[in-house]
Image (spheres, helix red, strand yellow):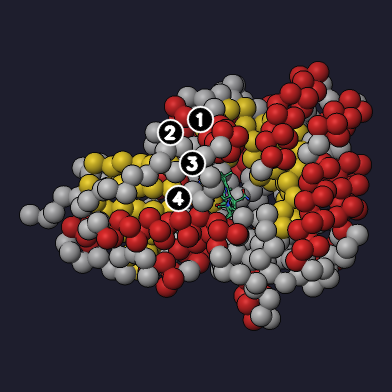
Amino acid sequence: MPRKFKILLISAYSGSKSNVLNSIISTSFYPSITLEQLLSITPEKYDVTCIDERIESVDLNWHDYIVGISAMTPSANRAYFLADEFRKRGNIVVLGGYHPSAMPLEAKEHADSVVIGEAELSWPKLIKDLENKKLKPFYQPSFISSEKIPPAKQIFMKYHKMGMVQATRGCPYACKYCAVKNVEGKKFRSRPIKNVINELKSLKTKRFFFADSSLTINPEYTKKLFQEMIGLNKKFSCYGNIHTLYDDEDLLKLASDAGCEQWLIGFESIDQKTLNQIGNKPNKVKDYSVAVNKIRDHGMMIMGLFIFGFDTDKPDIFQSTLKAVYQMNIDRAGFAILTPFPGTQIYQQFENEGRILTKDWSKYNLRNVVFQPKNFSPQQLLYERNKIAKEFFSISNSIRRTLLDDQLTINRMVKRLFVDNFFNVIYRKR
Ligand code: B12
Ligand code: SF4
């Protein structure tokens, strides 16, 4: 008779939950679709408990469980600590997610087994192997065909104001600093539209986020999806690439009709030289401004994401980026410090050049300098990035930008003045 296991699934979180502001940030947005997806592929006969460390503390006193822990790079140290403690208490520990997928040998030091890449095929197999006392140390990457991806089991909805759904996986652009290929691979796969629509219909929240790397990789698929979403009465945000949004008015119109409130766009840099060197993403700086205008004309907001610290960046990049963000009227912005996540090309390059300054993974959160930049000192990069972030997120600046912005509807103006400024205060405090 095979042994019957109880399963504990944890999404490790490295940030502090001790202050109220942090906890508002980490819980008010999205549920962990990672755990919800793992739950949906776990055989029904098992008792499963899921803990998202952003919302609940983990008590270490569990015994005789299979403990599956999910880790991104900044939460890897925390995941390893939990893994070690659970193993001491007689549990079987499995590590998975972005960091273990990129560093399986390191992860294996803390776990009985490591799942590399997607889990849809490996996790059920691992459980079967455990039942038969044949657990393997590593489960190699295997990509499930997209029509077989089951809907996530929405167990965390009660904690969150937004749902999360994933329609597609994989990104062919393979930017040098991006970790997506480590798990989802470079081949783009899209779920059947009816499956996505059914999942959306079952969402209890009006608002949700598409956990897709980019919804503009196959615009024809996305247009059909958006067409089917019209009438569902949902509001959503999603990632997209600027070069596609620039010249596809039909896509913009359908997105707006389907309820898109915001595009998250990796502009990455306002320097074309930098863009040409960081991967295959065909961003064209000269088109940014027109594209931004078109998206906003369709009533959608833009969260522009920028990265600082590339080898082609010179000390004037900070102020010129801020100026460009203001000139283009980008609604929201994120300013990241280039972070060489393990498994990426840039990590390999910096490792080969001896430029990785620390492997304290908890610092790999886009807010610390963990490598030796080419044209600045690490301190200068951190200081300049923080300086422009502080200016951009200042309340006075936000009010001024909002009042001067003639493309804003009253509704969006109110949202910018109250909601955005509330979060600006939190970001500045962090
Ligand atoms: C949505 C999202 C978020 C959300 C929610 C994340 C979550 N799941 O809790 C939020 C906004 C909170 C977030 C935060 C961050 N994110 Co993020 N995020 C994403 C995004 C767009 C989708 C992730 C997702 O939900 N995918 C869907 C689920 C189902 O897939 P999955 O998590 O990969 O899980 C599958 C496998 O990995 C595996 N698996 C995962 N865990 C486990 C555990 C076990 C035991 C097993 C067996 C298998 C397994 O099985 C799952 C099913 O196949 C990805 C990009 C992408 N396309 O993946 C970036 C991404 C994961 N994020 C990234 C980063 C850098 C961050 C931040 C550091 C950014 C920041 N400064 O705020 C933080 C870190 C937060 C933390 N925990 O420490 C990087 C990760 C790089 C890395 N090596 O860690 C990515 C890849 C983006 C990128 N382009 O590089 N993120
Ligand atoms: S386009 Fe986006 S998701 Fe794709 S590789 Fe580049 S950064 Fe990653």
Asked if residue 295 is positioned above or below residue 361 in the image, the reply reads above
Residue farthest toward the front in the current orientation of the protein: 18
- Give the numbered dot on residue 12: 4
Residue drawn 75% across and 30% down? Answer: 421
Residue 150 in view here: no
Q: Nearer the viewer, residue 298 or 370?
A: 370
Residue drawn 54% across and 27% down? Answer: 161
The residue that disc 2 covers is 156
Q: Nearer the viewer, mark 3 or mark 1?
A: 3
Residue farthest toward the top in the current orientation of the protein: 410
Residue farthest toward the left in the current orientation of the protein: 1
* Label 3–label 1 contact, CB within 8 A: no
The residue that disc 3 covers is 54
Q: Nearer the viewer, mark 3 or mark 2?
A: 3
- Give the numbered dot on residue 306: none
The residue that disc 1 covers is 160
For the residue marked with disc 1, what is the amino acid?
His
